[in-house]
Amino acid sequence: MKALALTLMLALGASLVTGEASAATGDDGGPYILAENSWVCVTPEAYDAAITEADKTDDIRALRKKMLDDKQCLTIDDDDIEDMLAPFVQVTERQDEKVKVRFEVEYYKRIAFLHRNFARVTFAGWTHQDRLRPRSSLANDD
């Protein structure tokens, strides 16, 4: 699943990372973390479609797979949140209640006892602003 997510985000435009200054939007930019099971989509419209479909379906796994296969959205799980690197989730743009976020995740793969391969992937996409949590909230979770 991780490899598929990596492929998706590369195809979606993980390189869509833009250099818009957070100061230009009046936002401090973060650092934030995403709530578990947050949708991150290529456009605000794709996000709305994913949420609408999620409310209608009983098979959320099939919806996640469909959105991933269609290269529209993915969901961020607890493992992804743990693997996020500083400066964690940064807000790069706002549109109504949606925010364009950017974050980097590091994936490891053991290839031998003392060796491992890793990849750092920068993700960029849209989510709802309510899915953002202050980074400091991780320290407060028990």
Image (cartoon, rainbow, N blue to C red):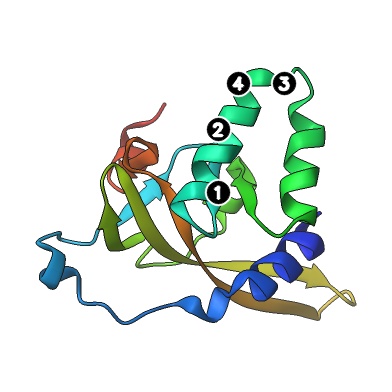
What residue would you read off at disc 4?
55
Quadrant of the rendered image containing residue 109: bottom right
Q: Residue at x 72, y 47 (%)?
A: 67
Q: Position of residue 7 (x, y in %)?
A: 75, 70
The circle drawn on residue 51 is 2
Type of amino acid at the residue the image marks with label 1: Ala
Say whether marks 2 and 4 touch (CB < 8 Å).
yes
Q: Classify 21 as above or below 88.
A: below
Sooner in the amino-acid sequence: mark 1 or mark 3 = 1
Quadrant of the rendered image containing residue 78: top right
Sooner in the amino-acid sequence: mark 2 or mark 1 = 1
Q: CA distance from mark 2 to mark 1?
A: 9 Å
- Quadrant occupied by the N terminus: bottom right
Q: Classify 120 as above or below 38.
A: below
Element type where label 1 sits in the image: helix
Q: Nearer the viewer, residue 35 or 95?
A: 95
Q: Residue at x 80, y 65 (%)?
A: 3
What residue would you read off at disc 1?
46
Q: Position of residue 48 (x, y in %)?
A: 50, 39
Q: CA distance from mark 2 to mark 4?
A: 6 Å
Sooner in the amino-acid sequence: mark 4 or mark 1 = 1
The circle drawn on residue 140 is none
Q: Classify 83 as above or below 18.
A: above
Type of amino acid at the residue the image marks with label 4: Asp
Q: Position of residue 34 (x, y in %)?
A: 43, 45
- Quadrant occupied by the C terminus: top left
What residue would you read off at disc 3?
57
Say whether marks 3 and 2 touch (CB < 8 Å).
no
Q: CA distance from mark 4 to mark 1?
A: 14 Å
Q: Residue at x 39, y 60 (%)?
A: 101
Say whether marks 3 and 4 touch (CB < 8 Å).
yes
